[in-house]
Image (spheres, rainbow, N blue to C red):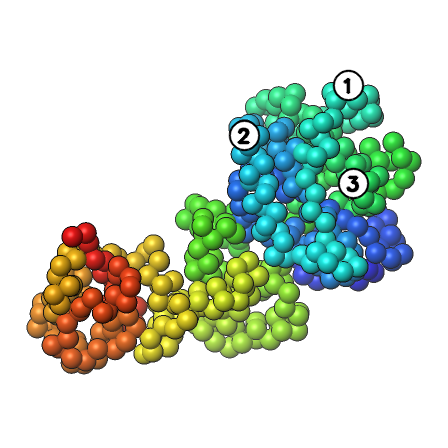
Amino acid sequence: MSDLLSTYRDRGFLQDVTPGLAARLARGPVTAYVGFDPTADSLHVGNLVPVMGLAWLQHAGGTPIALVGAGTAMVGDPSGKRQERPVLELSRIDANAAAIRVQLERFLRFDGATAARMRNNADWLRPLGLMEFLRDTGKHFTLSYMLQKEAVKSRMETGISYTEFSYMLVQAYDYWHLFTGEGCELQMGGSDQWGNITAGIELIARRESREAHGLVFPLITTASGTKFGKSEGENIWLDPARTSPYKLYQFWLNTDDRDVERYLKLFTFLELSEIAGLMKAQQADPAARPAQRRLARAVTGLVHGEDEAEKARAASEALFGRGAGAGPAGGALEVIAESSDMPVVTLPRPSFDDGLALVDVLVRAGLASSKADARRGLQAGGYYVNGEQVADPGRHLTADDFAGRDWVLLRKGKKNYVKVVRGER
């Protein structure tokens, strides 16, 4: 594991580390954990930095622990927050924790010598008695020590409840529990977790007279200075019900040229030599966006599987002009039709049952200014129905064009799509 810190450094994961970790890694494999806060029923792309950090640790021969914080979520972490988080019902916390567990299992191996472990701190925190916690944990920390932590200092003017003030002690207890029960010697997290991590190291030193370690990853911002992980103000989630594979693919495809090399290093398992080759190709032909395309395909495949990644790629290329002369394949037609940015026109169902002239539909869909304009466009081969080029001005749309669906996808040229939906009878 002596190369782990070099891997983190070369790929942009290393923000800060406690003294002595390099020497500990040189002695052999280590068990490490990262905590995930179940305040939502899905992780988002901002969580991918610590997730990938755990995956690289496992690749190096270490044992990762993914800790779902259904216990600490009852308290709320003040780190990076200007005001106290709302308290969730226990049933909601538990449902969120279960959903997050499923997502984490896509990134880590749960078999073999370094099998990943999933843990939920509700298992030991919820039964913990207050008097026991104060006696065994609280007595090891002074107020002055806690007030020096950035998460507390930043909230002193706006106010911080005793509940949030005590959060670092609860997380410190987590680390002590995993250290003594699971042999965990390293806690990792975002750089805003440094104070909480070092509190855990302090508790282990005081209670066990042994050494533990911490490592934090940088908080990612875009080259333009905005917070990473949002699109038009909304989180990009890993749950396909909240962010479709197509939208996830588009998020990475739209990466700024100034960010793409850094994201390839952080969010994929591509070798650094391959990334360097992609960046050379990017410099030679920036308009082709080879680096963004590789990034989008790799991350979407990691999150949703290769089949969904291929559908998203095919849909993206069909929507935006690459290979537009051929019809979408392998489910890409459905992915294209689900695009939220696509205009939708609803026409009465009986019209299609009896057959409706395509020239009329093109006009009503706004893809032609008149029937004559539609005929000219059809004769020139400029229109497509469900990805297939149509050149017959006398073509009608019938129930057969829907093939069991309630919509037909029309396209003019390379990029102008309209979804035509059959209305109710």
Q: Which mark is residue 178?
A: 3
Secondary structure, mark 1, is helix
Left or right? Give the position of 110 relative to 352: right
Q: Between marks 2 and 3, how big is the CA–CA gap?
A: 25 Å
Which is more N-terminal, label 3 or label 2?
2
- Foreground residue among 257 and 424: 424
Give the residue number, with chain letter if any, for mark 2.
Answer: 88
The kind of residue tagged 2 is Leu
Which is more N-terminal, label 1 or label 3?
1
Cβ atoms under marks 2 and 3 closer than 8 Å? no
Q: Which mark is residue 74?
A: none
For the point 47% across and 76% down, the residue is 285
Secondary structure, mark 2, is loop
Question: How many callouts does the rendering have?
Answer: 3
Left or right? Give the position of 21 relative to 310: right
Residue 404 visible in image: yes
The kind of residue tagged 3 is Leu
The residue sitting at the top extreme is 131
- Foreground residue among 353 and 317: 353
For the point 55% across and 39% down, the residue is 95
Q: Between marks 3 and 1, how big is the CA–CA gap?
A: 21 Å
Secondary structure, mark 3, is helix
Give the residue number, with chain letter if any, for mark 1.
Answer: 131
